[in-house]
Amino acid sequence: MKTKLITLLFVITVINMFGQAPATPKPANANTNNKALPPSEIVSNKIVSALKKVPLDEASILIYDYDGSLFSYDLESEQIGWTVKATTPFTEMCANKVTIANGVVYIPFINGEIYAVDNQSGDVFWKSRLGNITDQIVLKDQVPVVSNGKLYITAQNQNGSSNLYALDTKDGSLAWNYKLDTPNNDVPVLAFNNKIFAPSAANLYSFDAGTGKVLGQKSFEEGMHSKPVTDGENVFAANEKNLLFALTPDKLDVLWQFKLDENQYNVKERIFCKDQKIYFAAQGETVSSIYAVDSKTGTQIWKRDFKDDNVEYITEDSDNIWGYTKKGKLFQLDITNGEIATEIKLTTQPISNIEFPVDDTIFYYCDAGLIKFDLSTKDEDLYYMRTSLKDDVYSAYLKIIR
């Protein structure tokens, strides 16, 4: 299994190395069924039981472990309730995130499988496979975007192709797909205003969410390599270098652009909107920064620098920005002015997102397991300890069920 995983990681590396050059825009090529796809890109699905709305198990947290398994952990009994794993090889890695909608957990595995499971029992409603076991499709750094009865996700293929897939959430069958410009498509899409916005190479596309029809295409000088976000009116995305763009959702006209500091780049998923403002983190060679920008005008409101350290993750909770750096520094910023409220050098290095229970604690995952961090005492409690460790830790993901 380790040899197969190394092979998969090599494939991902090759994809990332050779997927950077902008592609020449081509005519719309949305495919509406599997007949138009080669065998290496078709979608197969298996219904196990009828999909239904499920009450939430609010005493539990979902842990997508770095070995590729997803399990429900009861925070009261401190016991594992259920575990789900993919059925085929190349899955000993957590490379994606999960989404809960109507009590159903949608799980993408790195090998191209996607499951819909009951959040209470872990029972499977349906299973889908993108591509086939011979021509391995890779799902990497994806969040299943669930909206209006469909699940949207992008996948990379070993043959050098990449597709945006829309699956029916009832059974996992293919609703539509679109062949993207480059195999390097490892940021989530945005669902907004009955449209799907997806970056690919030096282009940003908008699709009709129901049919997959291309509604707009905007080309840029550099590759678009950040998650698109919205303030409820317009769409925002950053290129792979140092520009953030504001675009109209209908025609993708550029309203304004914001230039980051020199030698800063790589926004990727470190971006969100709140109250007509855009907050994002950019990495750099000597300084990493978090910016707050007015979404209407593109005017900088504040900026917080981190010298000789890169911001790895940011999120928002209760009008505070939380995050951590590559060197294991946990921080809390006042969202209104960027002032530091908390800054702590952790003894454990986070590899996941941060989750916020109702009490004065936060959760994150490290290579040893689930950490419960007490904000008042600054104690790092190993709340759940893994029984075995791996050398090749990539990432993990947490989601409190609520």
Image (spheres, grey):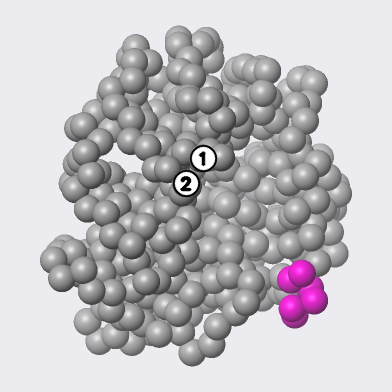
* Residue 2, magenta (yes or no): yes
In which quarter of the view is residue 363 placed? bottom left
Badge 1: how crowded within 10 Å, few (<14), some, or many (20+)? few
Quarter that holds the C terminus: bottom left
The kind of residue on which mark 1 rests is Thr
In the image shown, does 100 or 307 lie closer to the viewer?
Answer: 307
Residue 324 or residue 173, whichever sits in front: 324
Residue 385 appears in the figure: yes
Q: Quadrant of residue 138?
A: bottom right
Q: CA distance from mark 2 to mark 1?
A: 5 Å
Identify which residue is drawn at 33% across, 73% down.
371
Q: Is residue 273 visible?
A: no
Q: Quadrant of the N terminus?
A: bottom right
- The range drawn in magenta is 1-6
Magenta stretch encompasses residue 126: no
Disc 2 marks a residue whose amino acid type is: Asp
Q: Residue at x 64, y 72 (%)?
A: 392
Q: Position of residue 306 (x, y in %)?
A: 39, 43
Please name the residue that numbered disc 2 is placed on.
308
Q: Which mark is residue 286?
A: 1
Label 2–label 1 contact, CB within 8 A: yes
Q: x, y (%) of residue 80? A: 38, 84
Picture layout, residue 126 above or below residue 288: below
| Above/below status of 179 relative to 70 | above
Q: Sort mark 2 into few (<14), some (14-19) or many (20+) by Cα contacts within 10 Å.
A: few
